[in-house]
Image (cartoon, rainbow, N blue to C red):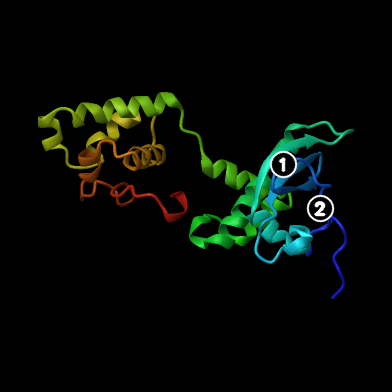
């Protein structure tokens, strides 16, 4: 088998290369050129199978990524970052994170292969989908809903009378919190073990089906 080219990880794509050795301890630097940004990763060289040649001769591109840590980014000379460049870069980085998650444990990854491919290759549709699905929960909404739940949770009479989500839905609408936002906030509180008994009581016929349980999905843990 021919020896791999110096500084190139076997199976890597153009633009993915190992830089010359630098002073980063028992690691090498791996640089990934993507548009106007050069992302630098530190890769542990003491990996089974690397031998004396180091990880450049032993790791595939995917293995390099799974054993790497971003240590910095560098803007390439001659490029000016625009808003679109930033979105594409964010998409690439998210795509790489999802790709590694899926290889390590598919249950960690909440998107499909098409989304991963789209993110890594600059598809605006995929980038918009991921960013929009993340949503936005303003601190004011979080605080307002926390205050509302507190009124029921701290009062033994109100807590005993609480039957489900419908009991507070009108108040949530008055606060400008729709059902989708309420589900996110309740899931957040439940994950932090806040308002436990009150949230558990929402698992009843006095709640819509989507507002009965607020457990985290496997890929959110």
The alpha-carbon separation of the residues under discs 2 and 1 comes to 17 Å
- Residue that numbered label 2 is attached to: 17
Position in image of residue 43 (x %, y %): 69, 51
Q: Badge 1: few (under 14), some or many (20 or more) residues near its Cα, within 10 Å?
A: few
Of badges 2 and 1, the one in the foreground is 1
Residue 137 located left or right of residue 179: right
First reached walking from the N terminus: tag 2 or tag 1: 2
State the residue in front, 115 or 26: 26
Position in image of residue 124 (x %, y %): 69, 46
Residue 124 visible to an observer of this rendering: no
- Residue drawn at x 16%, y 38% as measured from the top left: 162
Looking at the rendered structure, the secondary structure element under dot 1 is loop
Residue 55 located left or right of residue 158: right
Image disc number at residue 124: none
**View extreme (right): residue:** 78
- Residue drawn at x 82%, y 48% as measured from the top left: 19
State the residue in front, 197 or 135: 197
Position in image of residue 138 (x %, y %): 46, 28
State the residue in front, 125 or 110: 110
Position in image of residue 197 (x %, y %): 20, 41
**View extreme (front): residue:** 52
Answer with the quarter of the image where residue 181 lies.
Answer: top left
Image disc number at residue 24: 1
Asked if the residues shown at circle 2 and circle 1 are in contact, with their CB atoms under 8 angstroms apart, the answer is: no
Looking at the rendered structure, the secondary structure element under dot 2 is strand
On screen, residue 180 above or below 219: above
Q: Badge 2: few (under 14), some or many (20 or more) residues near its Cα, within 10 Å?
A: many
On screen, residue 97 above or below 76: below
């Amino acid at each position: 088998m021919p020896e791999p080219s110096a500084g190139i990880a076997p199976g890597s794509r153009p633009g993915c290369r190992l830089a010359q050795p630098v002073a980063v301890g028992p690691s090498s630097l791996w640089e990934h050129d993507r548009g106007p940004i050069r992302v630098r990763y530190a890769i542990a060289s003491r990996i089974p199978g690397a031998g004396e040649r180091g990880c450049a001769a032993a790791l595939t591109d995917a293995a390099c990524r799974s054993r790497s840590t971003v240590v910095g980014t560098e803007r390439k000379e001659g490029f000016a970052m625009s808003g679109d460049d930033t979105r594409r870069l964010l998409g690439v980085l998210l795509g790489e994170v999802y790709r590694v998650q899926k290889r390590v444990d598919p249950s960690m990854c909440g998107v499909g292969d098409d989304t991963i491919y789209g993110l890594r290759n600059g598809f605006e549709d995929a980038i918009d989908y991921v960013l929009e699905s993340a949503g936005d929960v303003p601190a004011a909404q979080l605080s307002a809903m926390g205050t509302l739940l507190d009124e029921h949770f701290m009062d033994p009479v109100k807590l005993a009378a609480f039957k489900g989500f419908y009991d507070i839905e009108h108040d949530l609408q008055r606060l400008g919190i729709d059902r989708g936002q309420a589900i996110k906030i309740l899931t957040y509180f439940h994950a932090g073990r806040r308002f436990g008994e009150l949230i558990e009581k929402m698992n009843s016929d006095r709640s819509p089906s989507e507002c009965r349980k607020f457990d985290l999905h496997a890929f959110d843990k």
